[in-house]
Image (cartoon, grey):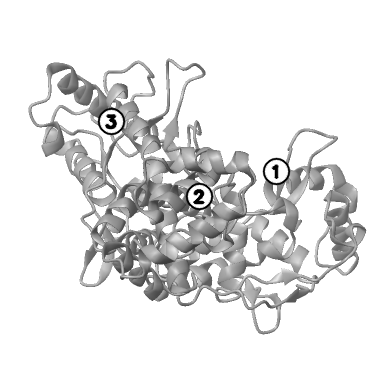
Amino acid sequence: MAIKLNKGESVFRNELIFTADAKAINIENVLVNLFMLLRHNGVRPRQRARSKAKSEINLETLKNVFTVLEKEGSVNGFSKNQDAGELWMRSNLVNMVYRGNLEKEKISSLRPIHLESYRVRNASSTRDYYTADQVYLMLGADPKVKENLRSFLSEGWDDITNKINVQDELDVDSLGLLHIVKNIKPGFLDTNESIGKIKPILNKQALLYCEDVRRLLVYKRLIPRNVLIDYFKTLTSFHLSIYIQKLIYLVPKMVESGSIDVKDDWNIVIDTTDNFDSQISKTSISDSEKLFNSIYKYLESTFKINMALEYCDLERDDSKNLKKALQILKNPPDDFEIYFRMKYRELYSQLDDEDKYLVEDITRYDELYFDKYLSIILNVKAKRQFIEHKRLLANLSQNNNTRGGFMSQGRSKKHPRRFNLGTRLLETIVQILVLDIEDDNFVTRTLSVEELIDNIKSRYGLIINGLSDQRFKGSDLNTHLGFKENVESFKLKLRQIGFYNDLSDAYILQRIRPRYELND
């Protein structure tokens, strides 16, 4: 069906709601582009146009860089150990697409282990589809945290002189990366693209992310730098997944109420058993199905907001415009229906007879012209967006990643998607939650398993033991047994990552103990 729609209404991505395009997202690429935004204060620069032969970066390019560095005395022994040097670069310094496929593999970028990582990248292989913009907006909810993160990521590099700062102690990977970029001119032209007037629609969720980043940075002198950045990557992917899940749940409520101030009672059940046939998996699968079944309602609500913005002739670059659009949807002006009647008739008049029949079939149950026009947009655009959003959720949740994952599924339809906790994700969360504030300073404290489970639920909306929750009041025996099994599996995961030991029968000794003591 060849229906020509207005671009402002039919393009789904709305930066006022969520900046990212629904595409296959790689979290490593997100961090590379986030570091670029942090470096340029929210502006996404573009590379100068160069021939492909000059702009394409590969391992031979990096080998040549280290050869030059050896000649100038910055490194020693590279020429005698080129094979070992190449292995180090492949495993520690670069991200690759099609890794392991000798015919297709190529470098996408340097690994995001330093703020300057973005300087060396093949832009076409490092696309993040504006997901980094969303992370940057969320960090903007607490400018102090954003600046502290930028300061930590840029350690070892002097912005003024564009030279390595030898006074900062860096790991060998970060130091090697800085030697690669130190003689490379950025070659960027600043653009006018900026997201300065946009505020996160879920401000509390953005503040929670900032608070978690703030807590992680407390460990910057205790945890090895590469481990801390891996925590940050895991945490960022986790928060992005929660953010989009909450949008799917809350945006339709916002449209209905005409305001972004709606009650956030979102929660999901986490299956910690690693057993697809566990009792609790049924509940977690049900929550996952509810999420994916809600995507269409979210798409419909977003298109409604886009149509309202088009009606008001408002751009998607100021959060004030979103509030105006929601108010108009709640209380449409007198000419609102007239406006969309004109648009519908204009669109209808341009169609051939066959397409007119299809449009009439699509809109036959809609009374208002606003709803008729919306039905046409959804018919043309929603199917593809639905598929892409399912993929986006799986990518951000790191589906089937046993370390940092938040979602998993079996190989057959018998075991559909459910929510879980990877060991690295759990480790990151525990490192955050064992911190407490005393006299404006962070200190570590021990926690009981029950306290940790309650904190995870109240802070992130993740239910591990829901027996005390109103949602499961009056639940059956199988649900009780499922949660009991879930708690035992959760304790086992805590033992595996070294935070919990219950060898003693004394309940007072069965505590989650911090790995790093700040009190001393």
Residue drawn at x 54%, y 39% is: 357
Disc 2 element: helix
Could you give the CA–CA distance between mark 2 and mark 3, rounded to whole angstroms?
49 Å
- Pointer 3: what residue? 491
Residue drawn at x 41%, y 75% is: 143
Residue drawn at x 77%, y 49% is: 107
Amino acid bearing label 2 = Ile
Q: Nearer the viewer, residue 338 or 26?
A: 338
Residue 205 placement, left or right of 99: left
Amino acid bearing label 1 = Ser
Is disc 2 in contact with disc 1, using a CB cutoff of under 8 Å?
no
Amino acid bearing label 3 = Lys
Is disc 1 in contact with disc 3, using a CB cutoff of under 8 Å?
no
Q: Position of residue 277 (x, y in %)?
A: 35, 15
Tell me which corner region of the image, top left, top right, bottom left or bottom right, holds residue 306: bottom left
Dot 2 or dot 3: first in sequence order is: 2
Q: Position of residue 507 (x, y in %)?
A: 13, 33
- Pointer 2: what residue? 377
Q: Position of residue 501 (x, y in %)?
A: 27, 33
Residue drawn at x 37%, y 45% is: 366
Disc 1 element: helix
Q: What label does residue 91 carry, if any?
A: 1
Which quadrant, please, contains the N terminus? top right
Disc 3 element: helix
